[in-house]
Image (cartoon, rainbow, N blue to C red):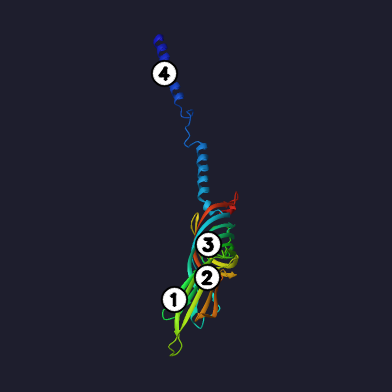
């Protein structure tokens, strides 16, 4: 009986020890807890990448310190000439119009001031009109070369963010040179006949026209009003009107009138380039500088 009791005691003790070991191994309190969030480092990396993308996307709204542009212009130019005598209505002149083109290089500072150098192929011209039953018209031109330097100012109209590149109105003033070759441009001769009253004898009429450019450099001054339209990040389109005053005669047409081979009158048509210009300009911004390191310079 003792032996049986001893055996049962050993078996029960072994079962209790086994159950105690199993409970300690699977105890949820002592088991390691798996984190339910991602490591800190990837979070920081993603935030930095987002900051870079944001900085790139706001570059267009940074205030501009200065920029350089190259422009190509096409325009219509009008200029008027003066005539000293019309030979009693036989000859005359009028304001003429002629198309031209130019290339310009400009520097813009703070989107407020601009300095522009412009070379244009645009003629100063005069027009000789010979009246009669069939009027004739002849247009003469100079060497077409013009070089100008202009200063421009943007009209802000109270905008606070004035250094941002936007479509805007600009006004400007400039001065330029007109190189002249002194060459003869055109020589014309006209012959006709006239009868006084009922006399059977006809008078022989003869008219000569000699056109030449000045042998000296002439100058001009102008004022400009334009609207500059921002088309793209690096493209502007300008629509402008310009008033120009010429100083010095660039093109001269000397005329002589003969009756029966005797010179009776003289006249001169002079052109100095005074007139108007209406044009359009396509400009490419090839260099641009922003204000650095200050978040206040963003729009």
**Disc on res. 15:** 4
Mark 2 or mark 3, earlier in chain: 3
How far is the residue under mark 3 from the one under mark 1? 30 Å
In the rendered image, residue 208, in percent from the top left (x then y), is placed at 50, 75
- The reply to whether the C-beta atoms of the residues labelled 2 and 1 are less than 8 Å apart is no
In the rendered image, residue 140, in percent from the top left (x then y), is placed at 50, 70
Mark 1 or mark 4, earlier in chain: 4
From the viewer's perspective, is the residue at label 4 or at label 3 nearer?
Answer: 3
How far is the residue under mark 2 from the one under mark 3? 22 Å
Who is closer to the viewer here, 226 or 259? 259
In-image side of 1 versus 77 (left or right)? left
Q: Looking at the figure, which quarter contains the C terminus?
A: bottom right
Check disc 3: other Cα within 10 Å, few if <14, some if 14-19, many if 20+.
some
- The reply to whether the C-beta atoms of the residues labelled 2 and 3 are less than 8 Å apart is no
How far is the residue under mark 4 from the one under mark 3? 110 Å
- Which secondary structure, mark 3? strand
Identify the residue at horizontal 51%, vertical 48% (top origin): 56
Identify the residue at horizontal 53%, vertical 56% (top origin): 70
Residue 18 seen anywhere in this rendered image of the structure: yes
Which residue in the structure is indicated by mark 2? Answer: 211
Mark 3 or mark 1, earlier in chain: 3
Q: Looking at the figure, which quarter contains the N terminus?
A: top left
**Disc on res. 136:** 1
How far is the residue under mark 1 from the one under mark 4? 134 Å
In the rendered image, residue 148, in percent from the top left (x then y), is placed at 58, 62
Residue lying at the far bottom of the rendered structure:
198
């Amino acid at each position: 009986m003792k032996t049986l009791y001893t055996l049962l005691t050993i078996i029960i003790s072994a079962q209790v020890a086994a159950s105690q070991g199993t409970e300690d191994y699977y105890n949820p309190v002592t088991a390691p807890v798996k984190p339910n969030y991602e490591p800190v480092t990837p979070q920081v990396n993603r935030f930095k990448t987002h900051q870079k993308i944001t900085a790139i996307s706001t570059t267009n709204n940074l205030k501009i310190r200065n920029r350089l542009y190259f422009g190509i212009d096409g325009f219509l130019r009008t200029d008027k000439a003066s005539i000293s005598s019309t030979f009693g209505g036989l000859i005359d002149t009028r304001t003429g119009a002629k198309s031209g083109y130019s290339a310009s290089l400009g520097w813009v500072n703070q989107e407020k001031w601009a300095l522009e150098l412009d070379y244009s192929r645009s003629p100063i011209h005069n027009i000789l009109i010979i009246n009669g039953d069939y009027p004739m018209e002849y247009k003469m031109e100079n060497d077409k070369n013009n070089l100008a330097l202009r200063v421009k100012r943007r009209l802000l109209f109270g905008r606070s963010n004035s250094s941002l590149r936007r479509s805007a109105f600009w006004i400007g003033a400039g001065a330029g040179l007109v190189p002249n070759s002194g060459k003869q441009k055109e020589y014309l001769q006209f012959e006709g006949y006239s009868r006084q009253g009922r006399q059977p004898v006809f008078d022989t009429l003869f008219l000569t026209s000699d056109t030449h450019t000045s042998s000296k450099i002439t100058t001009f001054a102008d004022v400009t009003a334009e609207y500059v339209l921002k088309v793209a990040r690096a493209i502007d389109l300008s629509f402008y009107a310009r008033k120009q005053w010429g100083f010095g005669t660039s093109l001269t047409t000397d005329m002589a009138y003969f009756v029966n081979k005797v010179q009776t009158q003289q006249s001169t048509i002079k052109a100095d380039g005074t007139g108007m210009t209406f044009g359009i300009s396509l400009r490419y911004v090839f260099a641009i500088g922003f204000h650095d390191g200050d978040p206040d310079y963003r729009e």
